[in-house]
Amino acid sequence: MQVGSCEMSLEPTPLRGTAEHMIEIPAGEIVLRDEGTKTNWNVEVGAFRLAAYPVTRELYAAVQGEAPENPAAPVTEVSWTDAVHFCNMLSQAAGLSLCYSMGDDPNGRDVACDWEADGYRLPSEAEWEYACRAGTSGVRYGELDQIAWYRENSSGEVHDVGTRAPNAWGLHDMIGNVWEWCWDLYDPAVYGPYRVFRGGGAHDLPRACRASCRRKSHPTFRIDDLGFRLARSL
């Protein structure tokens, strides 16, 4: 299976080889699992593009007209709501159609995604895990110390993106360093507006740094090892 890449230029954004570098992910299928309810479900995933790295502080600040500290580090302390607003800002700056429409609901229930739009968006949970696995079926796509910053090697802090080995499709930091927001509601019948995040972070033990590990929180939640990654529909 061939996985291609395409690079978008965006002026005056300073990054060209990190978050703007999008890997073309082929269509396929993924089996998701919720450990709490012990249930599995199959999801068909269409072809899409996913950034090779989490959004960096440099890109995040540049889109908002600010100067970043530690520019190559992944942006953190961003809520799900912050992430969808950023996706729209970046799409507008790039002259692309917006993926998200939203109102004033503080719980984010009125946010809608246009999956046909060509702008930037968050990956779905199924897209995220499918891309993370990159055709593998194990707990993770490589040896943990080689692919991830986590509690035992991170010295308690996030690290610059792309400094651990990528998966077979060229995606870095899918495991460890920072958790990544996804589009999906976790379980609206039980947890209301809580959204999914994936991947494990710099403070986590190996159990959290697995391709299948699911976490959740309110869309306004922010913490020092939670960021996001850009996707685009094909």
Image (cartoon, rainbow, N blue to C red):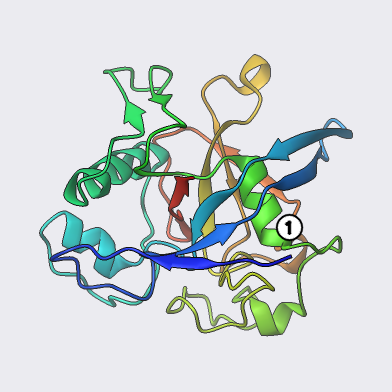
> Which is nearer the eye, 54 or 106?
54
Where is residue 137? Give x, y as percent.
86, 60
- Residue 52: percent from left, percent from top: 49, 68
Residue depicted at x 78% and y 62%:
135
At x 76% / y 70%, what residue is drawn?
Answer: 141
Residue sitting farthest toward the right: 38
Query: Horizontal and vertical percent for residue 106?
Result: 34, 22
Mark 1 = which residue? 211
Horizontal side, residue 142 vs residue 56: left or right:
right
Q: Secondary structure at mark 1?
A: loop
- Which residue does the image show at 26% across and 65% down from the upper left? 9
Above-or-below relation of 22 to 84: below
Residue sitting at x 34%, y 77%: 72
Give x and y (percent) for residue 39: 87, 32
Query: 54 or 231, which lies in front?
Result: 231
Please give left or right for residue 219 compared with residue 41 in the image.
left
Give the quarter of the image for residue 203: bottom right
Q: In the rendered view, tell whether residue 72 sits above or below residue 174.
A: below
Given the image, on which type of amino acid does mark 1 rest? Answer: Ala
Along the line of sight, which residue is nearer the eye, 202 or 14? 14
Q: Would you say 132 lies left or right of 180 here?
A: right
In the rendered image, the quadrant that contains the N terminus is bottom right
